[in-house]
Every structure is written in structure tokens, then in C-alpha cells.
Image: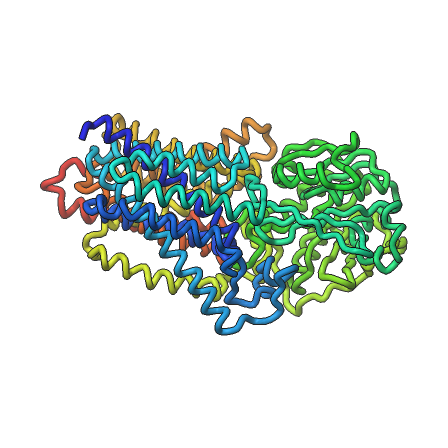
Amino acid sequence: MNSGKNSWELMLISFIALFLELAIIRWLSAEIRIFAYFKNLPLMAAYLGFGIGFLLHEQSDRWFQWFPRFVYYLVLIIGAAAGLGITHVIFVDPRKYFLLGLGFGDHAVQSIPSLVQTIKALLVIVSLFFLVMVTFAALTSKVGALLNKERPLTGYSINVAGSLLGILAFSLVSYLQCPPAVWLALVFCSLFYFYWNHKKPALLYFVASVVFVIFAAAQNPAIWSPYYRVSVVNASSPGSPHETQLYVNYDGFQAIQDLSQEHMGRFPEAVQRAYNRHYNIPYLLSKRKIESVLILGGGAGNDAAAALRNGASRVDVVEIDPVIARLGGQLHPERPYSSIKVNLYIDDARSFLQKTARKYDLVVFATLDSHAAFSSLSSLRLDNFVFTRESIHSAKSKLNPGGGIAINFFAIKPWLSQRHFNTLRGEMGVTPLAYSSLSNEEAIFLAGECFDPRRSLGVTDYQPTTPDFTSWEVESTSDEWPFLFLEKREIPFHYLLPLFIIFALAFIPLRKCQLKARDVNWHLFFMGAAFLLVETKAVTTLALIFGSTWMVNSIVIGAILITILLANLLIGWLSFLGFTFLYSGLFATLIFNFFFSFDTLNHFDWNVRLLGSSAIIAMPIFFAALIFAKSFAAVESPTAALASNLFGGLVGGLLEYLDMWTGLRWLNIVALFLYFMSMVFLFVKMRLTYLTRPELEA
């Protein structure tokens, strides 16, 4: 094959693989909710599939022909999930583990699942894991076949460049709010080039997949924001205030309500009490008129409408999802987002707190619980950072003298109420006022000089309460350990169960590939495991500093790939640097990241914070990329080497959950240990091959 053509095809197939990986991960977690709580499972399935696909590169002609059929089956199951009854499946008590769509709302399940439900859930998880795996194995077999025709480092650089384009393209379709049918059409149109000689069967499966997704979407219309699958349902009923219900990923998100006095006055007092809820409470209990309000997590506008009804002259609303904000502007009967007094910011709450210099009489933490990860079974998700000690402290710094903070939340468990209470009390220095609803599990905590508990709550079913706390001390969340929905530092057993089953069953396809321990490049295996942890820590830290928006995350991941490409380019000029020097730099930068507090950068302006934090986080990534490039340039089989690296990444995905127990900072130490193991295996191999491979001098 012409070298230029091979390189072009390798870049195209690499672009397709990364784009499809991102699409499947997002689509699967939206349509089958258990994968939102086990969000690493689709990623781990893709990693395993990529690795197996590289091992199957010699059989790519056969395996690649199976890809259209595999992806068709996957599309059918995901697209028909609601009809198949697998959108909400459980194998744990949903209220214990905060599975939002199951323990609460329309799909509420009040008890521990039966044996049949547990088996069904585990079958869904395991079956889809292996279907995703085999789909990507079939696709990646073609990547491996093309990669092996290039020089190792050249082929790897082309693969990374294609992956970078895949991230950019998926970021673009997310920005444009394109639905899954568009994602699939883009993938299939790009892939059709490779099936030109077998176009009829491939065209049949590709077209059938897209048509089916379009048909399924027409039955249940939704808008795909950069974060959620958003749907609108008219939930009004006779004798009650009109409601428009927003759903995100099939879970109830917010009822858009007209709570104005003119509208609510038409209904009996009992109805008014049930619907007025918490929105007016901070204003009714305030001894002074609240002029300026900051609302974090404004949603569709209920909180902003309450601020306007109670006389606020300036209301700043922060909402991360542009679609939810737009729907609020269009559908809310009180039209709060059209008021000249309201300023709407599409941003992350923590990011806005760090950027704004404005002061407020009241800061409202609206019900910010992430519907993409509202669960103790989730590993790190950035919404958790909104309720940490550092976040409350930042909000306190934005208060005018005599101002206050309000936190709205679901008081599902005593320890969760205690966590919010302790955090607010610790940062505000006063005992919060606590109120809870008599008709549901919502609660509100208030802290600040402006609040007077003797004032009337108005017409609402909220009552003063003494929070039902636990008999033991509950740890407040912090930026170091931000897991709001974990009762204590632990990895929940029910999280480990499906991971253990999948990890055990993963050996079956590996044995079919005749992979033996001696065939694994253990140096690159440990490099892959460590790099996934370093990447996770980098994305988390930078998103915390600059906001957990989809744009920031895309830029960070793209920057990591650019760093890898830069290392591949520079390693030829830096070949005089030995592995001893490179590993020393890697270990030093990891240790520095462990001890360095990024809060020290908050005193500088935005540009200094950007450059400083990016440089500190990028250094271990750059050293690791140089080590990988130097090692990979000398491998005999690029596909076997990358397979080992990806299998290591699979283990890294498992090890990421250690942060539930250790905290985020310790990921650097776990990564350091893994990199140390990679160094040991490298130096042992160098010792054994020194006479025949002098280019591997340390």
C-alpha cells in the first residue's frame, strides 16, 4: 500500500474510533441509566476492545467486516432501551445509593431489589459491556493493521492526531446540540470509504441503524444539550397549578411553575402549601430587604422568579446547561430570564465564584445535584465540588455585610443532612436554620446574620426542623475528597460486584486471543495504568480551577493529546536524555503535584492562574509522554505494545476508584508507584537485552 494512503487511512480510522467511543459513552449513560452511575464501564469496555482489536490486526479483514453488524446490534439495544424496560435497572437499594431515577420520582422503587431484578441488572451491565468491547475490537483491528505498516512512533503520532480530531469533532456536535442520529451518520459516512468493496451489507446495517434511531427519537422527542438528554412534558392536572416538567436523561429535573401570588391565589390554601415549597423562605426570613442575589444552579428559572417576586433589584443566575436555560426562558410563565434585573451566565458554579468580584446579599445553592452522577456509586464528578468547604467559603467571600447563604437539597439520609449542616456551620461560623417539607424530602439550610427564625414562613408546607443526624461524626466534603453522596471514605461493595464479574470474564476474550503473561509488555502496561490516573487528576484539577464545563474538559483532553504529539516530535531531538533522567523528572513532578496547593494561585489574575496551573499539571504528563515515545520507538510490534498499554489503562480505570477512599491527591502517589513499576520492568528488560539493543541505554 502507498505509504501516504496508509497514513491517511490510519488517521481517518483513528478519528472514527475516538469519536465513536465518546458517542457511545454519552449515549449509553443517557439511555440506560445504570451506566451513568458506573460511568467508567463503557470506557473500560472500549479500552478492552481497543486492546483486543490491536491483537487481532492480522485477522482484520474478517473482524472488520463484522463491525457494521456489531454496531447495528448495539444501536438497536441502546435506542430501544426504554421499550425493552432497561432504562432503569437496579441491583442495589436505590435509596441507599442515591440512584435518582429509581429511588425517587416517577420510577421510585422503595425496597431492596429482588433476585430477579438483580440478575436482570447484572445481565444488562455485563452483556452491554461485552457488546461494546467486541464492537470496538472489530473496529480497532483495522487500526492495528494500518498501524503496523508504519514506523512505530510515526504510526502512533498519526493515531493520536486522529484521536485529537475525533475529540474536536465530538465537541463540535455537542456544541451544536446534535442528536445521536447525527453522531452515527457522521461515523458511518466516514467509515463507508473502508467498505467500498463490500458496500451493500455495510450500507444496509449503517442505514438501518440511523433510520431506527431517527424513528425511536420521533417516538420520544428530546433535545441533546452538551450535558444531557433533555425532554419536556406537560404535567398539568385539574385543580393544581400548571406545570411543565423538565426531564434530563429520563429523570425528573425540575417542574417549571407559576408561583406568583396572582396565580397561586386561585387555588385552595392546601394546594398553595404543597406547591410554594422553599423558594420564598430566604426572603421571608430575612430581617432586611434582599436587593442582590446570586443563584447557583438556576435551572429553568424558579429560583430567579422567587427573587424577583420578593423585590430583588439584581439577580445573577448561573446555569451550566444552555438548553435548560433556554427552555426556562421560553417556557417559564413568570418569564424571569426576560427581566432586565436578571443576568444569566452559562457557566460552572465554582468557576463563576472564582471569577466574579461582585458582592451579594444572598447566595442560593439551588438543587444542584448532578443528574449525570447523582449517586454514591459514581466516582468523581465535578458537580460534587459545588458543596465542598472551599466552595462555601468562596460563596461567603461574595457576601455583603449581613448577607446569608441558602442551600436547597434532598434530605434523603440523616448523614447527608448532617454533612450539609456541618459544612455550612463550619464556614459561616453560626448554627444554620433548618427547614424541611412535610410532603416530600426536600430541605433548606440558611446561615447568615440576615435570617430571623421568628419571622413567618408564609404559606408553605415547610416547617422548622431539628435535622435527624447520625450518632457519629460525618466528614465534610472538600476539594480533596468531594464525594457528597458517599457516607464515608470507602469503595461501596455493590460497586465492586459488577466490576469483579466483568474483570473475571474479561480473561475469556484474552485467552481466545492466546495472550499470555510473557507476551505483555509490562513496562508499557504500567505506563498505561499510571497515565490514566494522571490524566484523570489533570482533568479534575483544571476543571475545578476553570470550570467543569464541557468546553473546558474538551480543551484539557485535547491539550493532553497535543502534549503527547509534542513529546513524539521532540524525542528525536532529545534522544540524548536517558531513561534515568526522564524518570527522575517524572517522579519529581508527581511529588510536587502531590504537595502543591493550587489554592495559592487564586491570589493571581486569570492569565497567571491559567499558565501556572497548566504548567504544573502538564509537567508529569510531558515527562511520561517522553518516556513512552522513547520506549515505543524501539518496539518490535506496535500493535502488541499499544495493546499492553491499553490493558494497563483498563487497570488504571479500576484503580481510579481508590480516590473514593484516599482522596484525589493520592492518585499522584498511586501513579508514582505504577510508574516506578514500569521503570523496574524497563530496566530489567534493558539489562537482558543490553548487548543487542544499545539504543536503550539509561
Q: Residue 534 appears at what percent x and percent y?
A: 41, 44
Name, please, the residue furthest toward the bottom.
Answer: 115
Q: Quadrant of residue 146?
A: top left
Q: Residue at x 65, y 64 (%)?
A: 413
Residue 369 visible, this angle: yes
Q: Residue 467 appears at what percent x and percent y?
A: 74, 63
Q: Residue at x 64, y 45 (%)?
A: 391
Left or right position of 222 against 156: right
Name, please, the residue furthest toward the left.
Answer: 691
Q: Residue at x 72, y 54 (%)?
A: 425
Q: Residue 286 appears at what percent x and percent y?
A: 85, 47
Residue 681 visible, this angle: no
The quarter of the image holding the C terminus is top left
Q: Which of the two residues, 225 or 481, is positioned nearer the viewer here?
A: 225
Q: Residue at x 32, y 40 (%)?
A: 584
Q: Quadrant of residue 310?
A: top right
Left or right position of 246 against 61: right
Q: Eyeballing the image, is 218 above or below 172?
A: below
The quarter of the image holding the N terminus is top left
Left or right position of 262 against 78: right
Q: Which of the two residues, 249 or 94, is positioned nearer the viewer here?
A: 249
The scheme the figure's colours follow is rainbow
Q: Residue 117 appears at what percent x and percent y?
A: 50, 69
Q: Quadrant of residue 575?
A: top left
Q: Eyeballing the image, is 508 above or below 305?
A: below
